[in-house]
Image (cartoon, rainbow, N blue to C red):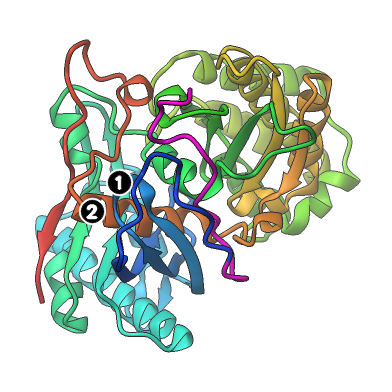
Amino acid sequence: MSGDPYHGEFGGAGAGGGAGAVPQGVPRPEVERVRIVAGCMTGTSIDGIDVAVAEIIGSGLAMRVRLLASVSMELDGRYGPLAAELRQIAEQVPLAAGQVADVSRRFALLHAEAVRAAAAKAQVRLDLIVPHGQTVFHRPPVSWQMFSPAVLARELGVPVVCDLRAADLAAGGQGAPITPLADWVMFRHVREGAGNGATAVINLGGFANFTVLPPGGPERICAGDICACNHVLDQLARGRLGAAFDRDGAAAMAGRADAVLGAELEAICGAQARGGRSLGTGDEVQRWIDRALGSELSGPDVCATACGAIGAVIGRAVAGAAGGAGSGAGLGAVLLFGGGARNAAVAGAIGRVVGEAGGRVRAGESTGVGAGEREALAMAVLGALCQDRVAITLPQVTGLPAGVAAPVAGVWTYG
């Protein structure tokens, strides 16, 4: 692909400052643009806000990224019980419009506090803030990433770009996954062994999703949602362990999986993986969770059952996608990010499956980006791409109708 303007390695994203080289064929300007951008993510687990402050060097797909600082903040605190309130809204519990609007405002105020803390930690002045908002409903073409951008822009006096999924949804796509192009910018330099295999990026959040990065340009990226993940595991931990989550998967590692209940969950999650749709609220796995919580199995056994089934489905989905990505060499590095990346039982189940396909699981931290930092950092990258008027979604990923170009995304608010 000697004529490919995207050919060549670049885009290192690490605290060590390795920004990478400009791709071959892309001219380097004499003075490159430098922006300081904060990306914010609250996932479907509804367990906190992650903020990443990045230095963005250059413009468009030639940009390189350096992570400067990150902050994680619990949702509950001075702005009330936001976790429970957001979970109510996401679970479609009827609330008055005024209540929903009040939650959205307090949610934005908490973002301001978290972003302010991250900028102070990095000792920088921000040029742009990119919040994802909270997904409280997602059934394309209808989706809502709830947020009040004017509150955040006013509090910090910095431009805000948000609602990044909406343009793709309006054009007929699923609006998800949203991070694959950012993954390409940040991680396409990561290679395993001889470097010919596809690199896979897996996010183990409320729902698991993946990006497969074969050698070459972004037009070869494949990505998708897989199945429910922490959405299941955290409910089991709350119901059976009396904890918000199973820290490091310790309980699951001590438990013994039940074959029958595991097969049932594997069938449900496998159907989600094969469905080719984006996942959000209202998934099919709740009935299984209720059965598991009502079973006679011990808490550790229930957790072990869920981790084994979910990890196996995720591993098969990624190995299959890499095999069909045309890399010519199968699967290479498999990078785990998200809260579930610290769950040894899930990581082990994924590793066993992808190992059979020639891949090797690596902690996302090995790239210089922490398990909980990748999505927030990706939002910073996507916001900068929006500012450069680069379409951030990929038609082959979000399922845009044939002949429909990916739109430029983003709703802008100025402080």
Disc marking residue 136: 1
Residue sitting nearer the eye, 49 or 230: 49
Residue 351 falls in image quadrant:
top right
Determine whether label 2 and label 1 are within 8 Å by CB. yes
**Earlier-in-chain disc, 2 versus 1:** 1
Q: Magenta includes 161?
A: no
Where residue 128 appears, as percent x and y from the top left, is: 25, 69
Q: Determine whether the residue tagged by mark 1 lies in a helix, strand or loop.
A: strand
Which residue does the image show at 35% across and 55% down from the upper left? 28
What amino acid is found at the position of numbered circle 2 in the picture? Answer: Met
165 left or right of 415?
right
Which quarter shows the C terminus? Answer: bottom left
Which residue does the image show at 80% across and 38% down from the upper left? 304
Where residue 340 appears, as percent x and y from the top left, is: 65, 48
Gap between marks 2 and 1 measured at Cα: 7 Å
What amino acid is found at the position of numbered circle 1 in the picture? Answer: Val
Where residue 146 appears, as percent x and y from the top left, is: 23, 53
281 left or right of 257?
left
Disc marking residue 63: none
